[in-house]
Amino acid sequence: MSTRNPAGRWRRLTRRQRAVLAVVVVCATVCAGLVTLVLSAGHRYEGRVHREEILGQSGASRDGQQWHRGALNLLLLGSDSRDGEPDQGEYSGQRSDTIMLMHLNGTRDTVTVVSIPRDSYVDVPARPGVWDGGKNKINAAFAFGGAALAAETVHRLTGVAIDGVVVANFAAVRTIVDAVGGITVCIPYEVTSTTTGRRWPAGCHRLDGNATEDLVRQRHGVPGGDLGRIRDQHLVVKAIAEQLSPASLIANPTRLDRLLTTAAESLTVDENLDLTELALALRHVRTERIRFVTVPVSDPGLDTPAGSAVLLHDQAAAELFTAVRGDTVDRWLTDNPRYVSVPD
């Protein structure tokens, strides 16, 4: 890991660069905690982030130079409780209800967030005394072996070497949205909350933190179930990006401080993730260059021993994972526009 002064490197970034990074930070927090982009602003924020050993063979076997050149891939996990689920009492751990790969392209100017449906029926490696290994829903990996097993499962599924892992507390969404003064989310279908009874007709809605958290948790009252919820999460991220601007963050340092503090306290990251290097790697990304994709699905209602699950499309999913590994995502998106979750 670099021994250079992180605070000094942060000061050398221009005000606009810092503000653009902050916009990306806040937006991606809703996805699963990409606030690492600017946590290297100083020890004030980095010291609030919890670290643990997560990556093993799932990690990128490189010499640390990945922070300075080439593409990067982060695994983003949003943890949530099992309240209301049929098996909520079966396992002691939480499940990762948001699973995303964030791909930063080799030229370091575009981020593609690839969402993996939480009920995808995949091979989950064994954990002695907990799980014998075999087919299960991908989000069960978090319950069986925490973020480490989730990372191993995603790595085996995609073949992507992971450069870092970020685990975010899903409940942070509420506080962050309130900190930015609310957001306007435009949804193309009606959503009804099975928790509170709130109803959002198709169209644009002004939401505070409570309403936003309610919306992004919904999957039974959303067209497409979990696939619809993934799209709602992407729409919320886009709405936050539109709410903020570099100028507004520069003009309101108190708001920025509150946002970053809240985000940092909701994170767990891999112990070897260099937050400063990551921030610098992402400094040229603009909010309009963040794209959202859902892994192709062939059957959203597959009957399995683990309950109703999602069957990924063998060929289309494999082609997407190959594009991430080879940094040819732009070409894949051009050939497969139907899988873009939030069109420009």
Image (cartoon, rainbow, N blue to C red):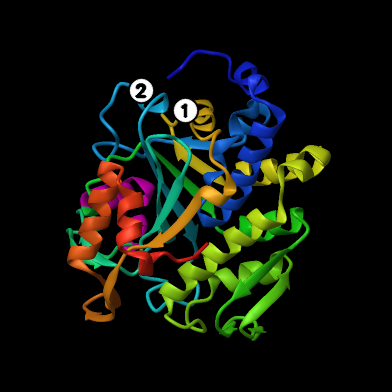
Q: Residue furthest top?
A: 4
Q: Is residue 150 magenta?
A: yes
Q: Under tag 1, what secondary structure? A: loop
Taking the image as shown, residue 134 lies to the left or right of residue 48, namely left
Quarter of the image where the N terminus is located:
top left
Q: Under tag 2, what secondary structure? A: loop
Query: Which segment did they paint magenta?
Result: 139-156
Taking the image as shown, residue 2 lies to the left or right of residue 14, namely left
Q: Name the spot of residue 282 as percent of width and height, x first.
A: 51, 35
Task: Let me know if residue 291 appears in the view.
Answer: yes
Please name whichever residue, 121 or 307, is drawn nearer the observer in this view of the structure: 121
Please name whichever residue, 18 or 271, is drawn nearer the observer in this view of the structure: 18
Tell me whether the residue at label 2 lies in contact with that at label 1, contact meaning CB atoms closer than 8 angstroms. Answer: yes
Task: Let me know if residue 92 appears in the view.
Answer: no
Q: Which mark is residue 64?
A: 2
Q: Residue at x 74, y 54 (%)?
A: 180
Taking the image as shown, residue 98 lies to the left or right of residue 142, namely right
Q: Is residue 250 magenta?
A: no
